[in-house]
Amino acid sequence: MEKKGFIDLDVDKSIDIIDEINRMRKKKNAVILAHFYQEGDIQDIADFVGDSLGLSQQAADTDADIILFAGVHFMAETAKILAPEKKILIPDLQAGCSLADSCPPKDFAAFKERYPEHTVISYVNTTAEIKALTDIICTSTNALKIVESLPENEKILFAPDRNLGNYIKSMTGREMVIWDGACHVHEEFSLERILELKQQNPDAQIIAHPECEKQILIVADHIGSTTSLLNYTIRHSGNSYIVATESGILHQMRKASPQKLFIPAPPKDSTCACNDCEYMKLITLKKIYNTLKYELPEITLEQDLMDKARGSIVRMLEISNRLQL
Ligand code: 13P
Ligand code: SF4
């Protein structure tokens, strides 16, 4: 099991997998938290579906004994740091994140040493080791507000996403040094193919996640986190949207506005569906069932590392609470 990163056991065909998940989560006082990029069937059984900020807030607040995280590793790790006494389960340990991987802790520690006067703000898509080297964590929902909440002359070192960092820098005019990392999913969107779609659907709004490259953000009518994109499609009076982020979010958009048209933005390489995050899509209902049943795989972290990483996440939650984000 450990080698594969998940429990590879078949589920008895005679049982109803969703009924069993419901029974087990009640009996074990477990909650299932799912990110918007999960498959629709997983989002539909979750106790809470949300963006990275919402999921961290839920993890910090829940009374459950077990949190099963239908998302990627850094999200489950964040939950463990916030709730070390709880059992945090992830249905597949291989569910990583290319953006988190683009910031190795050793290299980042050396980079940080070159900027001793800078306040370090890191995106939540980072390992616990990077969080331990960070002053304040942010998510795409609160990054702009967190940077704006700092005094104007404060120098900022932002990691690891260059696209989100440059977007915030352009919006705030703040002095920022930015780590050169990126998400392979959000850097795959094709401007040419998005503009072709726009020509075919002239009334469609282009909406994009700030992890997208600058040329995509320039043509976007709205830029924001997954929650912000979803809310925009609910409140906006239009009828069609070209959505430049991972395609899982379309499930909630279609549920909230069944009369509207949602078109996933296409990737540069037409032969691959790169607007799917293959890490997010490693999570399946069958793995969730086995994980709840055997309470494995579990996220474990050194106490010392958790203690070092917690302050930066708690600071983010405090600022978010204060600003009611
Ligand atoms: P959100 O916080 O906007 O949901 O983004 C998380 C993420 O991984 C984007 O790729
Ligand atoms: Fe990481 Fe990108 Fe997947 Fe988000 S979409 S979890 S940033 S690899």
Image (spheres, grey):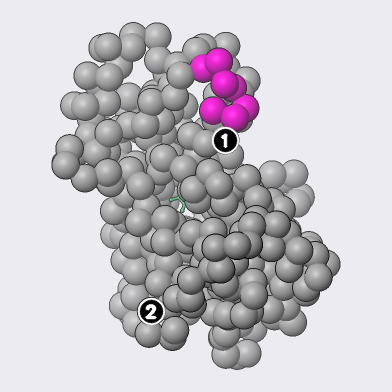
The kind of secondary structure element at disc 2 is: loop
Q: Quadrant of residue 316?
A: bottom right
Q: Is residue 255 highlighted in magenta?
A: yes
Q: Which residue is mark 2?
A: 4
Disc 1 beta carbon < 8 A from ligand 1?
Answer: no
Residue, x 59% and y 54% (percent of image)? Answer: 34
- Residue 307: x and y in percent read 64, 83
Question: Residue 229 or 278: which is nearer the viewer?
Answer: 278
- Residue 142: x and y in percent read 59, 47
Q: Amino acid at mark 2?
A: Lys
Q: Which residue is mark 1?
A: 252
The kind of secondary structure element at disc 1 is: helix
Quadrant occupied by the C terminus: top right
Label 2, residues with CA under 10 Å away: few <14, some 14-19, many ≥20: few
Q: Is residue 61 left or right of residue 199?
A: right
Q: Is residue 102 above or below residue 148?
A: below
Residue, x 40% and y 67% (percent of image)? Answer: 96
Q: Is residue 275 highlighted in magenta?
A: no
Mark drawn on residue 187: none
Question: Residue 309 or 90: which is nearer the viewer?
Answer: 90
Q: Quadrant of residue 268?
A: top left
Disc 2 beta carbon < 8 A from ligand 2?
Answer: no
In magenta, the rendered stretch is: 254-260
Question: Residue 81 or 22: which is nearer the viewer?
Answer: 22
Q: Is residue 254 above or below residue 47?
A: above
Residue 74 visible, this orientation:
no
Q: Nearer the viewer, mark 2 or mark 1?
A: 2
- Residue 252: x and y in percent read 57, 35
Question: Residue 116 or 316: which is nearer the viewer?
Answer: 316
